[in-house]
Image (tube, rainbow, N blue to C red):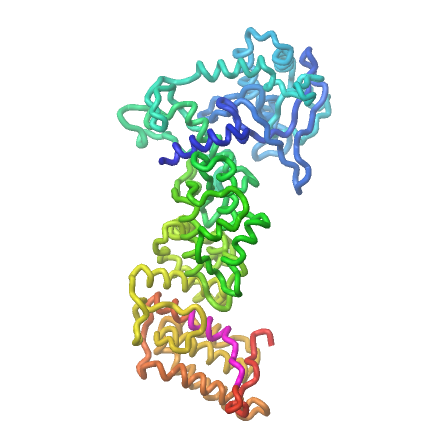
Amino acid sequence: MTILSALNTHYGRLERCGGVAPFGFSTESIAFALVLSPDGGLNSCRDLRDHTGRQPVGRPVTVPRTSKRSGTTPRAFFLWDNSKFVLGLGNGTGQPGITTYSAHAAAFRETHERLLDDATDPGLLAVLRFLRTWTPSRFGRHRLASALLDRNLVFQLDGDVDADGQARFVHDRPAARAVWERQVTISGGPSAVCLVTGRIAPVARLHPVIKGVAGARLSGGSLVSFNRNAFASYGKKQGDNAPVSEATASNYGAALNALLARNSGTKMRFGDTTAVFWASASAGGETSARNAEAVVAYALGVSRASSAYAAAFKSGWGGGGTFPELIDIRRTLERIDVALDPGTRIHILGLSPNGPRLSVRLWHETTLDLLLARLAEHWEDLRIEPRAWHRPPSPLALLQPVARRGDPETVPPVLGGEVMRAILTGGRYPRVLLTAALQRLRAGDPVTGPRAALIRAVLQRDVRHRGRGKQAGPSFTTGMEVPVSLDRQEADPAYRLGRLFALLENVQRAALGRVNASIRDRYFGAASATPASVFPLLLRNTSHHLAVLRRKSGTGGLAVWFEREMNEVMDGLDMTLPCHLHPESQGRFVVGYYHQRCARKPAPDAAEAETAAPDLPTDEG
């Protein structure tokens, strides 16, 4: 199923549930309602904003749909717009104070004079009379709040209520809806076969504006657009190059904007990509689809799960002190005492900004059980001891180890979409993920659990894709399994060199305490890339540090323990150290360093009691 077809189908589901506006309408953020008297006078201004947050935000209201304001000629909306069109006033661009927008106000008035030429409805007549008599000079006379400027405004007839007794906007009056529905019908372009539905219908000249993609323009972007001759073919213009009916274009736009809305629960971000996901209700029904979306949201770290879901996955994600271990996905789903079909279809769409357009970074269709199985495989690749995360990381958290100063804006472009594709398909992680993590370490960032886990995941997935088991002898290829926790039998030279570097650092810390620049600060990058040029110097310095420990009172046993650990690591190394380690081996160096750095010394037995060392010192003291 194509992207537009899947979104069009999802629109039908949302429409049945009342989650989207009907065809010809859209949901927009409205800040104020101008309350008019029947003669067109402005009685008051009603504040519709939500004031519960740090800053007031407009209220979502279903209004006649918008259209793109391309070109230099202002285009007005029907019975609503921002203050530049409705009042002819707004905040000036590049200059302080209120600016008059006469052309915008004239366009708004002319649009309504044309559409309401034969109107007899009191509400529509009140709007016409207001537009005919309103002048910007009356703004100060009515003492309207400056908050109206550059805000979206609607009209309301004073005292007008709906069947439930609630205040009704003019555009919701039956006469206004009839005018707009007639306008939508006659404004359609030439008919053609819709590429999405296969039906002959008027083709959309311009596709809807999509809002909510991180980094895109605040006014929104287009998923489908043709604004240059290079994008056209056979002399066709704009939407005729990819004929999609007006109804279908409106439907997919409404569905996608609903998925991208704030607090939708179906939206996540990783890198420069904003992704949405939704479930199909065609097989299991609406309840099953909603439950499937809740499971996916929890699994991807978008939202917290209900107590039922959290309990069902607790044993899979953190049971028994291991993380993560999702053994039987279907059995886990059966523990949830709600209607949930493991075969529910799941759609995931990733978008990123591209000027006035939106680029598709990711499009994936799968089933719920297969999706969670892929996630379980991904979490297994990320598994490392000590534990890097308390719960499975979200895609955004997964990219933080490769971001400078933790800023997601510094993540290499396109990386987020490639990582997410590897997670969903079970394919290899992008090689740039390993390179970016190593670059952060060479830049001086610490070897944290998330960075070590990310590096291990890239290497381990490569091993699985090559289909090779653990090799008996040393190798500088990536054919060996990458240990989850400290493996004293691991023969890989890079892994052992990482362990050795951690031991040398611990010796320095034990002998000298805190120093301005440790060997990790000075030599980690060089040791992991060119061991032969660094380790001889480090071993000579370590002999002096061990001598200091022997001379100190109470640390002689610690020196003996360090020597024994270093000998155990070095016994598995060749006498000739490698001159250079390629990125895969540098990654194994990091994993070995992390394991040895965080390893706890085992309790001594009776035979070793006299030479046993106390607990190793840490960075904290």
* Position in image of residue 534 (x %, y %): 39, 78
* Position in image of residue 453 (x %, y %): 45, 63
Which picture quadrant has residue 170?
A: top right
Q: Nearer the viewer, residue 551 or 332?
A: 332
**Height in image: 210 above or below 37?**
below
* Position in image of residue 550 (x %, y %): 53, 92
Taking the magenta stretch, the answer to whether it contains residue 592 is yes
Taking the magenta stretch, the answer to whether it contains residue 153 is no
Residue interval drawn in magenta: 591-604
* Position in image of residue 300 (x %, y %): 49, 50
Residue 48 visible in the picture: yes
Q: Nearer the viewer, residue 149 or 430?
A: 430
**Height in image: 570 above or below 301?**
below
Q: Nearer the viewer, residue 351 or 540?
A: 351
Please report the residue visible at 65 percent of the width from the left and 17 percent of the height from the top.
135
* In the displayed structure image, the side of residue 192 where residue 393 appears, left or right: right
Q: Nearer the viewer, residue 79 or 315?
A: 315
**Height in image: 602 above or below 299?**
below
Please report the residue visible at 60 percent of the width from the left and 77 percent of the height from the top.
621
Which picture quadrant has residue 119?
A: top right
Considering every residue shown, the one lying at the far left of the view is 234
Please report the residue visible at 32 percent of the width from the left and 31 percent of the height from the top.
231
